[in-house]
Image (cartoon, grey):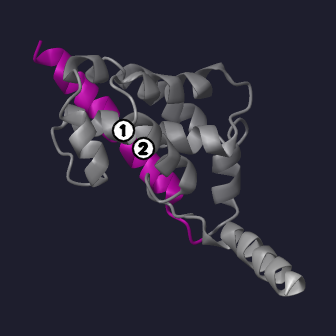
Amino acid sequence: MKRLFAFLLWISLSTASWAGAWGAGSFENDDALDCVASCTGQNDESCLSQALQAVRSASYVEAPDAAAAVAAAEVIAAVLDSNQAALPTELRSWLAKQDQSRIRALAPFASTALNRIANSRVSELAALWSEDAKSNWDVRIKALAGRLSSLTKQSTRTR
């Protein structure tokens, strides 16, 4: 009986690593989902700034930090263009309680972070995705960076 229990425990633990999310979308990986959980558990936007700061301060950006910063950038872009439909439901609920101006102010930091994340010489995530010829990850990152840049310029003009 002990051997059966040990075997079942081993199987469940070894297959848990297969169950992780890993997609090219901003919220299609475990690290981004961890960032979402972190944000929804806080009362302010500090989770977003922390995710971006981790990318800014690292000499080499590890994949988990990059994925969290991409999710943060997606949230900031959604606030800037008032289009939160693509965000996870719990994140939209959290955003409704936040100071939107403080999140908008993070846009330049998000743009800087995305530029670093897209560079495979300093970003593990970019290096990993560059190995997948069928991936459109780089296109998505460039589109998000362009969207943020455009929205930041519009926001600056309307002030």
CA separation in Å, label 1 and label 2: 6 Å
Callout count? 2
Q: Amino acid at mark 2?
A: Val
Given this view, does label 1 or label 2 mark the residue nearer the observer? 1
Where residue 43 sits, quadrant-wise, is: top left
**Whole-percent x and y of residue 6?**
84, 77
Q: Is residue 122 left or right of residue 136?
A: right
**Whole-percent x and y of residue 110?**
43, 28
Foreground of the two, 75 or 4: 4
State yes or no: residue 155 in magenta.
yes
Mark 1: give few (<14), some (14-19) or many (20+) Cα within 10 Å.
some
- Residue range corresponding to the magenta coloring: 134-159
Q: Amino acid at mark 1?
A: Thr
Is the residue 53 above or below the residue 73 in the image?
above
Residue that carries the numbered disc 2 in the rendered image: 36
Residue that carries the numbered disc 1 in the rendered image: 40
Pointer 1 with pointer 2, Cβ within 8 A: yes
State yes or no: residue 52 in magenta.
no
**Whole-percent x and y of residue 91?**
30, 44
- The residue under the point 76% across, 82% down is 8
Q: Main secondary structure of the magenta part?
A: helix
In the picture as drawn, the residue positioned furthest to the front comes out as: 1
Mark 2: give few (<14), some (14-19) or many (20+) Cα within 10 Å.
many
Is the residue 104 above or below the residue 29 in the image?
above
- The residue under the point 31% across, 53% down is 88
